[in-house]
């Protein structure tokens, strides 16, 4: 039924590069979106739009504010050290130079708190809630003139960080409006385009999360690598047909899916919680255990049970990501379903990309003898380093010990 290693086929010259590129391609899907850099000469208005409430944040550079208002070198100059005593002045200035109106007229801006951001000389952040809203209006009108009268080259930017209806989540770089001295007053449409757009956006976030989650991907790869082999007399041998390999893959992916779906739902519904730090430690440990099974038979035919157990903790990790993106505050049921659907689509894409190459490579003599153990050792090293880093909040120089090609895809 299975081929011995002695009769294994040599590595076809055109297929080995394909396998390598496939593995590297999956790992290089990890790409964090770069936030828009704070720039001198610009001020920012961020909005978070929810079903029945709107909140926001003003951001401005002290290197712009102080000289423009003639405060530099005087007792009135605003610094990081005296910000608390000057905050009333800043709030008054913004109330005089920014007006946000709904369909019935100007809406009150209620400042909540403030903080200093140490970037490019220092930015002041003022958070606020928008009052006077019984329901979300279709349009908001902005009248923005921050520093325009003093600095004609100054520009203001409106960025919507969160708006479920338009599929906008954790946005820090896509600009919605640009204010200038000649375009101070502008309208912004909040009208929902229906739930479908928000649903599809959350599905996309689920796909991106699984593709950007190196730890989740490594766990899945560690489970997929031996799927085209079977252990016999303490040795790996190739399976003869694709069907048993696919059956095995379906079992472990289903076990993982069911398990993480349960804890994702329980955590998101605020029924069950675990400390995020230890959830991340166990997720890292799951990679090490799955990789170690490639070297020594740890699971012994119970792989789906082990996968389900670890999948419970991966679900808590997914819930943490949902919370960080602000997706638990509205349309909870729909968001949960859409995010989970996206995660499954992302997993299926990884399986579909990797399994054909693994099946073709299963008879190569170097696959069980070299590729499998080398991949296992690398994953154990990386996962063990993550366990230590996450448990003790330290940084280890593990990346420097890895080959340069691997360093590029390991965060």
Image: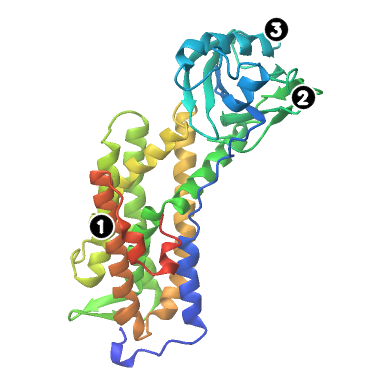
Figure coloring:
rainbow
In this rendering, position of residue 185 left or right of residue 312: right
- The residue tagged with tag 1: helix, strand or loop? helix
Residue ID for mark 2: 152
In this rendering, position of residue 91 left or right of residue 209: right
Q: Which of 202 and 152 is in front in this view?
A: 152
Identify the image quadrant of residue 224.
bottom left
Residue ID for mark 1: 384
Q: Earlier in the sequence, mark 2 or mark 3?
A: 3
Q: From mark 2 to mark 3, how far is it between C-alphas?
A: 31 Å
At 47% across and 67% down in the image, what residue appears? 24
In this rendering, position of residue 39 left or right of residue 84: right
Residue ID for mark 3: 104
Q: Which of 307 and 114 is in front in this view?
A: 114
Q: From mark 2 to mark 1, how far is it between C-alphas?
A: 55 Å
Q: Where is residue 76 in the image (x, y as percent from the top left)?
A: 56, 12
At 54% across and 18% down in the image, what residue appears? 78
- Count neighbours of disc 3 (C-alpha within 10 A) and say few if under 14, some if 14 to 19, many if 20 or more: few
Mark toward the viewer: 2 or 3: 2
Name above or below for residue 173 compared with residue 57.
Answer: below
At 35% across and 89% down in the image, what residue appears? 8
Labels 1 and 3 touching (C-beta < 8 A): no
Q: Which of marks 2 and 1 is nearer the N terminus?
A: 2
Q: Position of residue 211 (x, y in %)?
A: 47, 53
Q: Position of residue 37 (x, y in %)?
A: 58, 39
């Amino acid at each position: 039924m299975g081929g011995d290693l002695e009769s294994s086929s040599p590595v076809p010259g055109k297929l080995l590069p394909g396998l390598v590129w496939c593995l590297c391609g999956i790992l290089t899907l990890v790409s964090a979106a770069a936030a828009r850099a704070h720039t001198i000469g610009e001020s920012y208005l961020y909005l978070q739009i929810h079903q029945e409430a709107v909140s926001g944040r003003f951001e401005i550079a002290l290197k712009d504010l102080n000289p423009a208002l003639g405060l530099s070198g005087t007792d009135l100059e605003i610094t990081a050290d005296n910000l608390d005593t000057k905050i009333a002045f800043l709030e008054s200035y913004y109330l005089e130079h920014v007006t946000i109106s709904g369909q019935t007229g100007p809406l009150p801006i209620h400042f909540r708190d403030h903080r200093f951001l140490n970037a490019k000389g220092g930015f002041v952040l003022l958070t606020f809630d928008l009052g006077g809203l019984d329901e979300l209006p279709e349009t908001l009108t902005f009248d923005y003139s921050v520093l325009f009268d003093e600095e004609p080259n100054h520009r203001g930017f409106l960025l919507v960080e969160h708006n479920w209806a338009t599929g906008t989540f954790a946005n820090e770089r896509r600009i919605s409006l640009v204010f200038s001295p000649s375009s101070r007053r502008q309208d912004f449409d909040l009208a929902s385009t229906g739930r479908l757009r928000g649903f599809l956006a959350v599905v996309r976030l689920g796909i991106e999360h699984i593709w950007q989650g190196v730890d989740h991907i490594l766990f899945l790869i560690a489970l997929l690598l031996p799927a085209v082999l079977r252990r016999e007399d303490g040795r790996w041998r190739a399976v003869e047909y694709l069907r048993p390999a696919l059956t095995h893959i379906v079992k472990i992916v289903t076990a993982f899916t069911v398990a993480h779906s349960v804890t994702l739902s329980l955590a998101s519904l605020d029924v069950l919680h675990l400390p995020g730090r230890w959830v991340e430690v166990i997720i890292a440990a799951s990679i090490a255990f799955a990789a170690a099974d490639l070297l020594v038979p740890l699971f012994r035919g119970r792989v789906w049970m082990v996968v389900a157990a670890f999948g419970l903790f991966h679900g808590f990790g997914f819930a943490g990501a949902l919370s960080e993106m602000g997706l638990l505050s509205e349309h909870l049921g729909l968001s949960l379903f859409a995010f989970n659907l996206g995660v499954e689509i992302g997993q299926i894409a990884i399986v579909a990309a990797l399994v054909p190459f693994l099946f073709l490579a299963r008879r190569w003599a170097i696959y069980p003898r070299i590729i499998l153990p080398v991949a296992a050792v690398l994953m154990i090293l990386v996962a063990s380093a993550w366990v230590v880093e996450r448990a003790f909040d330290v940084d280890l120089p593990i990346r420097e010990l890895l080959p340069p090609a691997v360093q590029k895809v390991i965060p």
